Amino acid sequence: MGNRGFFPRLALVNLARNGRYYGPYLLSCTVTAAMYYILRFLACNQGLDNVRGAMYLKSLAGVGCFVAAILSAVILLYANSFVMKRRQRELGLYNILGLEKRHIARMCLWEMLLCAAVTLAGGILLGILFSKAVVLLLLKLARIPAQFGMEISPQGIWETALLFGFLFLLTLGQNLWRLSRAKPVELLHSASAGEREPRTKWLLVLLGLLALGGGYGIAAATKHPVEAMVLFFGAVILVIIGTYCLFTAGSVAVLKRLRANRKFYYQTRHFTAVSGLLYRMKQNAVGLASICILSTMVLVTVSTTIAMNIGLEDSLNKMFPYDLELIQDLERQPEDTMAYLTQAEEAARAAGGFTESRYYSRCWLFCGLRGNEIALNLDQDCVRTEVEVVTAEDYSRLTGRDVELAPDEVLACPRNLGDFPEAFTITTRFGQEGLPFRVRETVTETIRHGSATLLMAEEAGLFLVVPDRETAEKIMDLDARRGASQFRVQMNLAGETYQEKLDQTQAILARLSRGEDGIDFVSKQENAQDFYAMYGGFLFLGSFLGVLFLLATVLIIYYKQISEGYEDQRRYQLMRQVGMSRREVRASIHSQILLVFFLPLLAAGLHILAAFPMLSKMMELFNLYDTTLFAACSAGTLLVFCLIYALVYGLTAHAYDRIVGN
C-alpha cells in the first residue's frame, strides 16, 4: 500500500468500470453545475444594473439559485446513494481481498475528488460557454435591448465551486458513514439479500388520505387570489406528505388487493409483476413519490409561466386601459380644469395626434365598513376598503347611460364586500352622524383607469356614483386628509408601434409642466418595460427550473429502472428455468414497468387537476383571468410532458430488457 499512485489509479479504474452508473451521475452533476453558474451569473451581472426592468430578472435569478441548489443536493445525494448501493458487493470483495476500511475510504476519497473535478471543470466551462446565449435569450423574452460582450463571473465560479464542493463532501461523508457501519460479509451478499413482505400500515394510509384531502380541499375552497398565494405553500406541503404516505403505505395496500383478486393475480404476466413489486415496494415507494412530485413541479412551473406570457398583452391592457393618463390634483389646482384638458390635447396633437380622449373627476378615500356605516376612521373590527366617487354627469358621459339621481341616491358597485346594505351612512367615526345615502341600483360597470402596480389583486373596494360635484365635495370634506380629488385625462395615442407611442408620450410630457404643480401621469408604454421584464423573467425561470426538475425526474427514473433490472435479473432467469417462455417473461416485464412507470404520471396529473382552481386564482394576481387559456396551457404542457415521459420510458425499458437478458 506504499505506492502513492495506487489509490488514484484504482479510483479511476472503478469509475470507468462502473460507467453505466457514473456516466449519468456525472452528466447530471455537470449540467446542474452549469445551470447553477448561469443563474449566479445572471443574479450578479452588473451590466444589467442600468437596464430598466432588469431588477426583476436579477431577483428571479436569485430565487432560481436557491431552488437550483436544493435540486442539486437532491440529484447528487440520490444518485450517489444508488451508485453506492450497486457497488456494495464490490466494496465487500475489496475488504475480503485485504483492503482495510481505511484503504477503501481513501479510494472513495479519490473517487469523490475525480468526480468533483470533472463536474466543476465541465460544469463551469459549460456555464461560461452558454451564459451569454442564455442572457441574450432572457433579454429577448423580456424585450430588453441586447447587451453584447463576453463576461465571466468570478463570483459565480467561486459560489458554484463552493456549493458543489460542499455537496461532494456531503456524499463522501455519507459513503464513509455507511462503510464504517457495514460488515464485509453483509456487503458481499447484499445483492442476494431478500426482502420481507411489507405490512400494510393503515395508519400511514389514513394520514396520507387526510393530508392529500386537506391539500385538495384548500385548493378547491380558496376563492380569493391573495388567499390562494398565502395558502398555496401550505397546500403543497400537505400534498407532498400525502403523496409520500400513500406511495409508501397505500401502494402496498393496493398490491395486496390485486393479489387477493384471483382472476387478476393468477395470470402469468400479473403474477410475477405484482409479487415482485410487493416485496420491493418499501424501497420503490420513495422513488415513485419523488418522480410524482418532480413531475408535478415541471407541469406547474411551465404551464403557469407559459400562460402568463401568452396572456401578457391582455393583462397589460387590463392594468393600463389607455396609452396615457394625465392627472391633475384638484386640491392643489381646483379651478380651470378644462383649460388643462385643452392644453393636454394640444400637446398630443403636436406630438403626433391621438385617436381617443376623455376626461372625468374622481375622488377617493380610505374608509372602514361596518354594517351600514362607512367611517373614515379605521377600527380593527371593520372591513377596510377604498371608496371611489364620481359624479352622475361624468358617469353618464363615459358610459353612455342617462343617469339622474336624487340628492340622497347613489349607484354602487361593491367589490368583495359581501352583502352590501341598501342604505348606508358615510361618517367620520362609527356611531356619529354623517351623510345618509340609499343605493338606487347596483352596477357592474365602473370607470377604468390605469395603475402602475404590477401585481394587482381583487381587493375590497366600493365605487359610488353620486348626484353632483357638491355631493362629492361634501364626502371629501368629512376628512380630506384621507383621500384625494383628481381630474384625469385619458388618451389613446395615434402611434402604431410601441416605440412610436413611447416617443409620443415623452414629447407630450415635455410640453406639459409636471411635478410640484400637482400634475402627474400614468403611461402604458413607460410601465410596459417593467411588465415585460417581469413576465419574461417568469417564463425564463419557469422554463429553466422545468428543465432542472425534468433532469432530476429522468435521472431518478433511469436509476430506478437500472436497479429494478439488476434485482429482477436472477428472478426472471429462474422463471425461465422452471418453464416460463420468453414471451411470457417479456409480458411480465412490461406489465411491471408500466405499472411502476406510469403510476407517478397519473398521480401528477391528478395533482394538477386538483390544484387548478387555486392556480387559476393565483394567476389573477397577474391579471390573467382567462381560465380557458390557462386550462389549454396546462393541458398542452401535460401532453408534451407525457410524450417526453413516454420517450424516457422507451429508453429505460430497453436498458431494463438488456440487463434482464431478454
Image (spheres, rainbow, N blue to C red):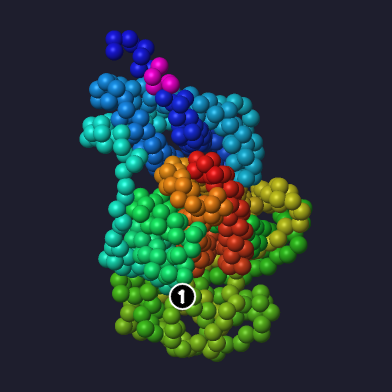
Residue sitting at x 46%, y 26%: 17
Nearest the eye: 559 or 186? 186
Q: Is 318 in front, or is 274? A: 274
Q: Is residue 10 magenta?
A: yes
Residue 568 at x, y = what percent? 44, 46
Q: Secondary structure under badge 1? A: loop
State the quadrant of the C terminus: top right
Q: Which residue is mark 1?
A: 416
In the rendered image, the quadrant that contains the N terminus is top left
Left or right: 171 with respect to 134? left
For residue 273: magenta?
A: no
Q: Nearer the viewer, residue 68 or 538?
A: 68
Residue 615: x and y, percent?
49, 63
Tell me what residue is drawn at x 33 percent, y 61 percent. 249
**Picture coordinates of residue 394, whole percent (x, y):** 62, 76
Question: Which is the main secondary structure of the residues drawn in magenta?
Answer: helix
Regarding residue 637, the answer to whether it shows in the image is no
Which residue type does callout 1 highlight?
Asn
Vertical order, 62 against 169 (above or below): below
Residue 408 shows in this picture: yes
**Residue at 43% over, 21% down:** 13
* Chain part drawn in magenta: 9-13
Task: Give whichever of 273, 655 is nearer the camera.
Answer: 273
Q: Is residue 646 above or below residue 159?
A: below
Is residue 192 rendered to the left or right of residue 636? left
Indicate the position of residue 567 as horizontal and vertical percent values: 41, 44
